[in-house]
Amino acid sequence: MSSQNQTGSRRARSVKITGLALIGALGLTGCSEAAKYGWLPSTPGTTTDSDEIIQLWVNSWIAALAIGVLTWGLIIWCIVAYRRRRNETGFPRQITYNLPLEILYVTIPIFMVMVFFYFTDTEQRQITDRADNPDVIIDVRGKQWSWDFNYVKANKYDAGMQAHLDGEEGAAETLPTLYLPVDQTVELRLNSRDVIHSFWVPAFLQKRDMFPGKTNYVTVTPTREGTFDGKCAELCGEYHSEMLFRVKVVDQAEFEQHLSTLESGYLGDEYDRDSYPQEKE
């Protein structure tokens, strides 16, 4: 057997082994719980919006993977079908253009973009819409490097202190904790006292930036009790990594009991580092 044939045989075996390995890896990951939900830091049933976000994310990946497989298949088919044969010389016949093919290559991507845009825009509008009459309103104030929570309707506040992470256990118990009642519509009004921060609860699959002088909003209805981690997702200074908080979703009785332990009042913009003109609602 010639060296050329031996090289081609080895290459063919390598391609087969690589293909089988990829198929096996995809099969194994597809069986895991994390892969089922697109490796997102949440599971269905956490909030009323999380199910829709997970569905949009997973379906987008399925569509992208299907398009990718089709594209890769066509590329491989062209490589194999139109490769230079043995004993062939010269170049194949050159074609300047193929109008039907070019139209196809333009219309299909446009259609794909329109479909992705439609579903993404529909979902985003649903998530960002503010509730007309939320059950609970909480003014969240980010500050270097902690959080203040004003429970507006109850006229109660919880002033957070900066976490000091020293590697010892129990630090989580000292973090500022935002209490939310389960199955109640909550409007979070997000403000910053100094620099740009970002309010992020990974399990809720929502993140919103916080700008000095501007109020942003998050409307969420938690549907499962539990304790969830939260953090600032915007690099905001020396102790950004310690700007953590927790979210406790509890029943209505425990929520009211927690409010009864807080101080009465409202920590407004008078405690901001500078005086920023606040936008009107």
Image: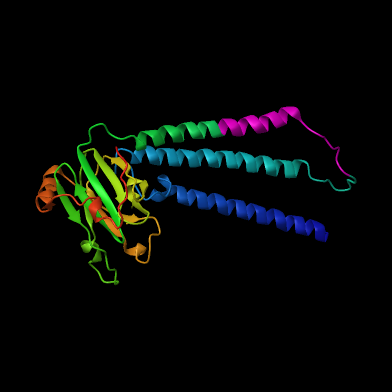
Q: Main secondary structure of the magenta part?
A: helix
Q: Position of residue 66 (x, y in %)?
A: 55, 39
* Residue in the foreground of this view, choosing between 167 and 239: 239
At 14% from the left and 46% from the top, the residue drawn is: 155
At 22% from the left and 51% from the top, the residue drawn is: 149
Residue 240 highlighted magenta (yes or no): no
Magenta segment, which residues? 91-112
Position of 191 compared to 3: left or right?
left
Q: Quadrant of residue 239?
A: bottom left
At 64% from the left and 43% from the top, the residue drawn is: 72
Which quadrant of the rendered structure holds the C terminus? top left
Q: Position of residue 1 (x, y in %)?
A: 82, 59
* Residue in the foreground of this view, choosing between 81 and 3: 81
* Residue in the foreground of this view, choosing between 64 and 16: 64
Q: Position of residue 193 (x, y in %)?
A: 30, 54
Report how many numbered discs are placed on residues in the image: 0
Q: Can residue 32 be seen from the camera position used here?
A: no
Position of 270 compared to 42: left or right?
left
Residue with the most extreme top position: 100
Q: Can residue 148 be seen from the camera position used here?
A: yes
Q: Position of residue 144 (x, y in %)?
A: 31, 61
At 79% from the left and 56% from the top, the residue drawn is: 5
Q: Compared with residue 122, is residue 5 higher up or lower down, i.e. above or below?
A: below
Q: Quadrant of residue 278?
A: top left
Position of 178 compared to 69: left or right?
left
